Image (cartoon, rainbow, N blue to C red):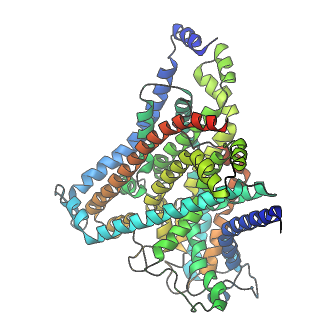
Amino acid sequence: MTSAELQRRWQKRGGLTDPQFALTIVIAVLLFNLIIIIIPLGYSFYLSLHDTNVILKKTEYVGFDLWAEAFAEEETQDAAIKSLIFSGISVVLTFALSLAMALVLNLNFPGRGVLRALILLPWAVSEVVTATMWTMLLDANFGVLNGILAPWAVPDGQVWLNPNWVLFWLSLAFAWHLAPLGTFFLLAALQTIPQDLYNAARIDRAGVFSRFWHVTLPHIRYAILIVLVVVTVEAFRQFDLVFAMTSGGPGTTSQILPLLIFRYNFQFSQYGLASAASYVLIIVATILAMAYFVLLGRQRKQVRVAKPTAAVKAA
Amino acid sequence: MDRATGQKIFVGTAVFFVFVWTIFPFFWMVWASFMTDSELATGVAKGIEEPTLEHYGRIFGLTETEAIFGGQTKAMGQGFVNSLIVALPTALIATFVATLAGYAFGRFRFPGKTPLLFTLLLTRTLPPIGILIPYFILFKTVGLVGHPGGLILTYLTGIVPLLTWVLMGYFATLPVEVERAARIDGCSRIKVLWHVIVPMGAPGISAAFIIAFLFAWNELLFGIILTGGTQAQTLSPALLAISPLTAVGYSPVALFCAASALSVLPPLALALIFQRYITRLNIVDPVTIRDE
């Protein structure tokens, strides 16, 4: 019996069709999700239009003044730039690490299963613990890095988390924590590449890099895009790691946007300004995500068209 | 040196680097946790002259603790319990909801599927701080600050879309034959879901459960704001309370390392036990799977 016949028989008994059934579930879940998200977002929007004075317990409607303030404030712009730098470095580092580890794990060696299990561990620990570990490595006074490098004439007590480099080290710690996830996405894609393609390329005397460029990369293109999406989103919404490792310091040199909003709200009780600034963050994140989705959709079509040609070439 | 040996050396080196990169930070944190405070102050990267368990003893309440940290170390134990109280229901509810949604998205075609999916995924990209501020003010008025229920609700906003995505891709890879046979025998779709999909997809569903559990166990920001300093304080805020960053004067780095090392035991155990299932999840191609 085909599923279409089954469908018809089912409908006669007064049940829902498959699409109706699926739609019912999906809409119920989506409604639940939207309710727990739209109510706070709506309330946050309301807050962003009102100047709240906590001491006088007075709330005053000010229109989009606070939005303008959030955009114009030097502190906010500075934090936004830091967010972009942090996300940018994080994406590059995390992706490079993910790909390198995936390529290594795709090789044949004894103990591969063990290593595959091990590399999952950094992903399983919290950002707070990641911060602890990297502080142990980088601390100027007792850190491991200074201890190991001491014999090689590195000035004693080198301050790694200095204003110029702090965002880089935060990104590296972030990459250590998140790269396993990317590794597994890429590894799954790598393992779908037919071995024949490599053999054919070898017969054509293609070198390692040529094989990587012409055989490996086209096959994992889609997975690469997914990894970039996931990492960008995670880096952009990251709070825990930076808060636990530097709290935005030294000074405000690693104060990315989420940390600044946190300070506005929970240290200075400027609910309106914090909400307005968080809307800036939300809007940028949404634009970023939508751009990626469009890109994904386009890539998907290309992959679908490209697949048969690759197969024909191999044959 | 022939080609094969050269290749072996190359592979060996690469494997070695991946191994060291992964283990290095873990190793030094645990190493430091066995040092006395005065020894640690002179550097972590050296042999330990007199290894000590006093930091672990303090956390378990076996060793005397300076008055200022007495409360905090007690809060660690409480944090373990509280995190469990929050993480288990979060993971259960999220897995239940996402199983339904993932089944619908992964197995059926219906009008508006792609836009609905993107709407769901967009909610995942929202920065947590943007959601937290209104929730904090709302919860303050209804008394949900310092209550696990509030935390669970806010965790669901982030974790349900992610799990749906994960499970959708996973369900789409399961064979349809058994399901079809059950339907022909007159099972309703809900029955099929419960008696066929759930048992058959148990590895994926348990992996999703672990992902949700780890998220709730590890999270800091919501935990600090919604439970920090209260009876319901979860583990990450409790940890941060003894962080050398925030502590004034005496710097309890070694204690902090010991506490951190203990806090990762449950996640590490779960990740290792379910490693095979977690890595089997196909979340690479969520949108296309059903169409191709």
How many marks are shown on the rendered structure?
Answer: 0
Nearest the viewer among B291 and B108 is: B291
Using the rendered view, name the quadrant where residue A61 is placed: bottom left
Q: Is residue A268 above or below residue B282?
A: below
Is A229 situated left or right of A61 in this image?
A: right
Q: Is residue B206 above or below residue B31?
A: above
Quadrant of the image containing the N terminus of chain B: bottom right
Nearest the viewer among A151 and B163 is: A151
The residue that appears at 43% across and 77% down in the rendered structure is A249
Residue B267 appears in the figure? no
Most extreme residue toward the front is A204
Residue B143 appears in the figure? yes
Q: Is residue A149 above or below residue B109?
A: below
Residue B223 percent across, percent down from the top left? 49, 60
The residue that appears at 49% across and 29% down in the rendered structure is A25
Using the rendered view, name the quadrant where residue B192 is placed: top right
Quadrant of the image containing the C terminus of chain B: top right
Residue A213 percent across, percent down from the top left? 59, 53
Residue B241 percent across, percent down from the top left? 52, 72
Nearest the viewer among B292 and A239 is: B292
Is B53 situated left or right of A180 in this image?
A: right
Using the rendered view, name the quadrant where residue B20 is placed: bottom right
Residue A274 percent across, percent down from the top left? 30, 62
